Image: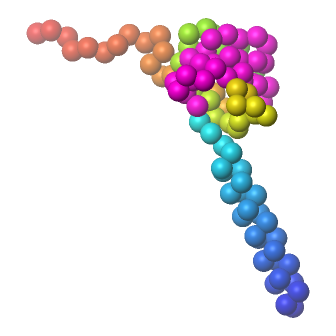
Amino acid sequence: MRKIFGLIFVLAACVALAGAAAAQTAQNVHGTVQSVQGSQLTVKADDGRVLTVDMSAVGQSIQQAMTQGMGVTLAGSPGASADQFTAQYIQQDSSANQPSASPTPK
């Protein structure tokens, strides 16, 4: 019985550590689309970095909606080098191509 509880504890610890490691590598990055080529996106992040983004895990309709100058938030993980990023999710800025709201004069 002790062996079973010990095994369950070890498995639970492994799952917790794997979840913590995944949470540490997940990132959100906001920036502006510089270019799009197939499933590769180039984004200039707000912090000045220029990232090559792998969009292959993102839906085809989202990939096709990306255009130069569009503000986006990327959710995913850093790649093998500082200028690479793998996107799991991409959200277009809600204010993109929207007229700004201003009060109407009375």
Stretch in magenta: 29-57
Considering every residue shown, the one lying at the far bottom of the view is 1
Q: Is residue 39 magenta?
A: yes
Instruction: List x then y, in percent, for residue 50.
Output: 64, 20
User: Residue at image x 66%, y 50%?
Assistant: 23
- Name the quadrant containing residue 42: top right
Residue 28 relative to residue 82: left or right:
left
Q: Main secondary structure of the magenta part?
A: strand
The answer to which image quadrant residue 52 occupies is: top right
Q: Where residue 36 sits in the image (x, y, percent)?
A: 71, 11
Q: Quadrant of the N terminus?
A: bottom right
Q: Residue at x 60, y 23 (%)?
A: 49
User: Total label count?
Assistant: 0
Vertical arrangement, residue 45 with respect to residue 67, above or below: below
* Lateral position of residue 81 relative to residue 72, left or right: right
Q: Position of residue 64 (x, y in %)?
A: 71, 13
> In this view, which residue lies farthest toward the left?
106
Of the pair 90 and 61, the residue shown nearer to us? 90
- Left-right relation of 105 to 32: left
Q: Is residue 1 above or below residue 11?
A: below
Query: Which of the 4 image quadrants contains residue 6?
Result: bottom right
> Is residue 92 in view from this perspective?
no
Q: Name the residue: 71% across, 17% down.
A: 41
The answer to whether residue 90 is seen in the rendering is: yes
- Is residue 105 found left or right of 22 in the rendered image? left
Could you say which is closer to the camera, residue 2 or residue 20? 20
Out of 79 and 37, give the one closest to the viewer. Answer: 79
What sort of colour scheme is used for the picture?
rainbow
x and y, in percent, of residue 11 in the image: 82, 70
Q: Is residue 51 magenta?
A: yes
